[in-house]
Amino acid sequence: MREMVIAGNWKMHTTPTDAGDLARTIATRTREPGVTRVICPPFVCLAAVRDALADDDDVAVGAQNVHHELTGAFTGEISAPMLVGLATWVIVGHSERRRDAGEDDALIAKKIARALDAGLRPILCVGEQLADREAGRANEIVDTQIRGSLADIDPGRARDGGLVIAYEPVWAIGTGRNASGIDASAMTDTIRASLDGAGWGVGAAQTPVLYGGSVTSANIGEFLAEPAIDGALVGGASLKPDEMAGIVARAGITARARGLAG
Ligand code: 13P
């Protein structure tokens, strides 16, 4: 049985002054058996969020990125060992980093290895551009991303390290135009087929796959109704306690239905 995960990616929002209060409010309003909750604030807010959640060790803290080297002359960067004690998860390969920081699959594979070495659970993001989907190339693009981003990562190590994959079609991020549950589920099947093709064996079926891209409390049900989808990576709505309360409540219903809540 796969874990149900609702992760919030706060992107470049909140400050060390207000992040703790927001995290605590969300944590209090989203207690649901069987649902793993993760909050990913900006680097500078990690300590505040960790401290705010100290009494609620049920909510995990994640970083939004990690550098691919351990130490060195990399001005402004944060390495995996630096995150230990601040975060237990990390988002890797988000499309905004692929777009703005030029991250490619080979670099992302190095980051995943660093995250696993440091005991951080990676959330690997993949997803096609609109032009790729319209040209009928979405599956091919995501398959390439999966194979490239996980090249040389031992499947057993990834599974033991709690790797999660998030399918985030780029055209659905921040646009209010979410994918359909059916399309997201079909891509989830493609992702698991890619893992299988890369020799993951049983790990392909065991790896949680989330959907991300304009997820709200109003549309989360469409995704969780798909048995292949194990939760969501939420952007804009993750900053709104009412939205997170609705999203996690819906995930709790699915967790109970899937026998995860016991
Ligand atoms: P939105 O939910 O704002 O579309 O963002 C999705 C996302 O990029 C999460 O990582």
Image (tube, rainbow, N blue to C red):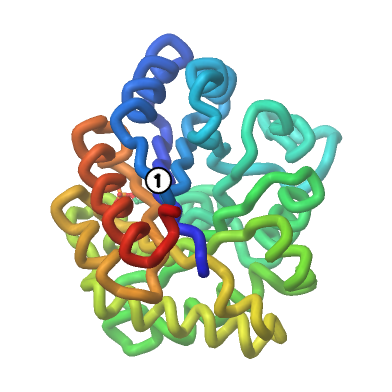
Q: Nearer the viewer, residue 148 or 104?
A: 148
Instruction: Identify the image quadrant of the C terminus.
Output: bottom left
Residue depicted at x 21% and y 50%: 216
Q: 152 left or right of 92?
A: right
Q: Decide: is 28 above or below 131.
A: above
Q: Quadrant of residue 137?
A: bottom left
Q: Check disc 1 and give the amino acid type.
A: Pro
Q: Nearer the viewer, residue 186 or 142?
A: 186
Q: Dot 1 corresponds to which residue?
A: 33
Location of residue 71 (image quadrant): top right
Q: How many marks?
A: 1
Q: Secondary structure at mark 1?
A: loop
> Callout 1: 10 Å neighbours few (<14), some, many (20+)?
some
Task: Measuring from the top left, give residue 75's x and y in whole percent.
Answer: 72, 30
Q: Residue at x 34, y 26 (%)?
A: 28
Residue 37, above or below 253: above
Residue 159, image x, y percentages: 69, 65
Asked whether mark 1 and ligand 1 are closer than 8 Å, the reply comes as: no
Q: Residue 44: in sight, yes or no?
A: no
Answer left or right for 120 relative to 192. right
Q: Residue 95, position in %: x, y?
A: 46, 57
Image point (55%, 55%), residue name: 123
Residue at x 56% of width, y 60% of height: 164
Q: Looking at the image, which is closer to me, 59 or 153?
A: 59
Residue 34 shown left or right of residue 65 in the figure: left
- Residue toward you, 121 or 137: 121
Residue with the most extreme top position: 17
Q: Position of residue 219 (x, y in %)?
A: 18, 58
